[in-house]
Structures are given as C-alpha cells and as structure tokens.
Image (spheres, rainbow, N blue to C red):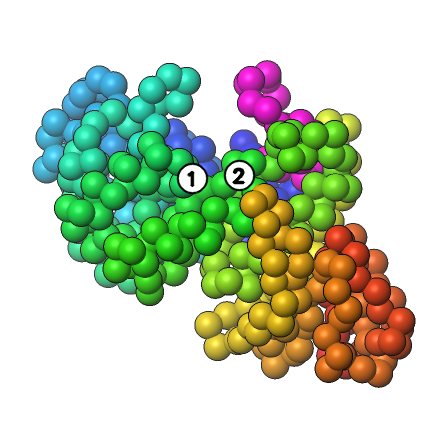
Amino acid sequence: MWDFKAARESGAAFDRPFFEFFQWGTIEKNPEQFDFSETDRYVYAAQVNGLHILPNIQPFAAWDHTGKGKPHDMAKYRDFVGHLVERYDGDGTDDMPGLIIPVKHWEVLNEPEFQQEPLVFFQGTPKDYLDVLQTTYEAVKRADPSAQIVQGGMAGMMAVSTSFWQSIFDLGGAKYFDIANIHSIGHGEHLNLPAFRTFLARNGIANKPIWITEVQFQQARQTQGYTAADFAKVLARSYIFALANGVEKLFYVNIRMPPVKSGVPFTEDSALIDDRGEKSPIFYAHLTVANMLGGLSHSDSVQTIREKVGDWSIDEGQYKFNVNSNTIYALWGTGAPPPEITGNVKVTEISGEQRAIDASALRLTDSPVFVEPDLGARTK
C-alpha cells in the first residue's frame, strides 16, 4: 500500500494508483468472473484518508491475450469497463460497499508511446491505442455520463511522444478524452507545459483542461548536487508556474523512494519523505503551495505580472492570484516586488514559516514567497 497518510498530510487531494489495481485481468480473472476485492481494498484505504482516485485502466487480461497489445475481444473489454465504472461511480447501483468518494476521472493507459524495454506500457500502433481509447471512452460514458476521461499521459515532448500522439490526433482521437495530460520526469521547471500547449493548439485542442499526472525531479545536469532544500524551490516554482498558466491538477511521483533499487535516477533529496522517514523541505513546499493555491477554481483569477521562462528553470515569477476572494501574490526572482503591494503584509515562505512585515522591506530571491496584503485575509 502507498503512504496515503503522508500524501494527505502533504496537501495532496488525489491518488493515482499502481496500474495493476485497475488492470482488466486483475479484476476479471476469467471471462465474466469479477473479483474486485483487491481493488476495493486499495480504493477504500485511499478514500478513508480523504483522497480522490485517478485510476489508470489497463486493458490487459492473460485469458484474452498475452503481452500489452489491444484486447482481442473488444466487446468483452467494453463490458469489463462498464462493470468497473459502475463499481465506483457512487450512483447507488452495484457500488463498492463502503464507497466514500465516487470515482469520476479515468485515465486510459500510461505513456502508450513507450513500447521498448525497459519501459513497455503498450504494444501497438497509434490506431490500436485509439481503438482502446474510443472503446473505453464510450463504455465509461455509458456507465457514468458525468465521468471524465483523462488522456493516457504523454511521457514528455520528445519525438517518440509527439509522433505517436500526432498520429492519434490525425485520426480524430482528441474527441475521446476530456482532459489533456502531460508528464515531466526531470524535464525542467516548466513541466513541458509551454510546448504541450503549443502542440495541443496546433491540433485544435486549445480548450481542454490540462493535468500533469507525473511530476518528478531528479539529479541531472541542471540539478547536479542539489539538496532537498534546492528541490523544494524547484517544486514551488514549477507548481506555481503551472497553476498560474492554467494547469488544474499536478501529481508528484515520489512520496518516498521505492523500497527496492529500481535503477531510476531519483534520490531521497527529491522525495517528500526522506530515507529516515522524516518530512523533507520538498514536503513542506508541496504542503505550502497546496495550502495557498489548492483552492484555486474556475471562478478565481490569475494575473501574470512578470514571468521569465528559461530552457530549464522559471527564472522570474510574479503572479497575482485571487483565490476565494483572497488576494495572494506568488513572487520570486531578481526584480523588485510589484509596486502595488504596499503597507503591512503577511509573507509565507515555502517552508510554511510566516512573518508580518511592511511591504517596503520585501526582497525577492530564487525561493518563492506568498504575500497577502491584508493580514486578516488568511490565517494558518
């Protein structure tokens, strides 16, 4: 089981479960023999900790086909998806006993463009994936018209990703997901967002919400020797930038390091919980951003005052958020603070530490701060 308690304490609202829990053959072990017990236990454990679920539907069952290609019997797969959605939609019909939070978002596979070792998430052509996506979309909507389909996360903006997804879009695949989805594993503080937006717009997909369902930072050329405190700044800058530019949800990958060596270039310095089980600076940065901006909704507003996007880092950021009628500035960089900020203000560091100062004493650094003009507007 994942560390749901630590995830919730860090400000997380969603859990993206291990793929196996929502794999066709895990639940329908033989044709028309459904066993939800393992998946139910996972869903319940997450939900008692207050976490929503973003399941990743995996269309693989050994009795239907071997490997990771599209199902041989699409009718049986469609029937499975209907049973799966009905189990967790919260409509009172055939629901999981003890269901607390209905599941209203479903992702269809993960990084399907990755088809070679060591990362094989799908095996097939873009048309094969589109067949799975369309079948899943139609089955989900039939079982729960209010549910939304999340694009199987693009691994990034590399050629292998854009080529695969361009073929899907050329085939009309954009109509079969409601939420666009990009990943960023060590790809920079911009989280691939500017290039992804351009890619979507070029394909006439400018109005879909965007989620980033994998965010992870790692030791790389740009972050060589970074400490947990350095990665805390990286996370804060990237999350604020993403939220200011319209991303609705972000999912951080490593709450803790995996219990076994996996060969991935991650260290405990970029995990929320370190190897001793203690909360790291990045944990508190995640929590602080969630506390300050987690309530951002469609009815709120964001004004970009100053922004400088580098090849890897977000060098300057000055944003004015209006969240639930509260004004919150998020600021970092080498420039002066916005001149409109005057008088007494409350400053919140990414560590969560707060202080009251006069705005004239505010100095910006590479570590973001949240500034609230009205000391009585928010209390922590």
Which residue bears the numbered disc 2? Answer: 187
Look at label 1 and name its amino acid. Answer: Gly
Q: Are marks 2 and 1 in contact (CB under 8 Å)?
A: yes
Q: Residue at x 80, y 67 (%)?
A: 347
Is 106 on the left or on the right of 266, as rendered? left
Crowding at dot 1, Cα within 10 Å, few <14 / some 14-19 / many 20+, comes out as many
Relative to 331, say whether 299 is above or below: below
Residues 183 and 194: in front is 194
SS under mark 2: loop
Question: Would you say residue 258 sits in the magenta stretch?
Answer: yes
Residue name at image x 67 percent, y 59 percent: 316
Q: Amino acid at mark 2?
A: His
Image quadrant of residue 23?
top left
Can residue 360 be seen here? The reply is yes
Q: Provide the residue span drawn in magenta.
A: 253-274
Q: Position of residue 294 (x, y in %)?
A: 59, 62
Mark carried by residue 156: 1
Q: Quadrant of the C terminus?
A: bottom right
* Residue 276 forms part of the magenta stretch: no
Q: Position of residue 343 (x, y in %)?
A: 84, 83
Which image quadrant is residue 269 in? Answer: top right
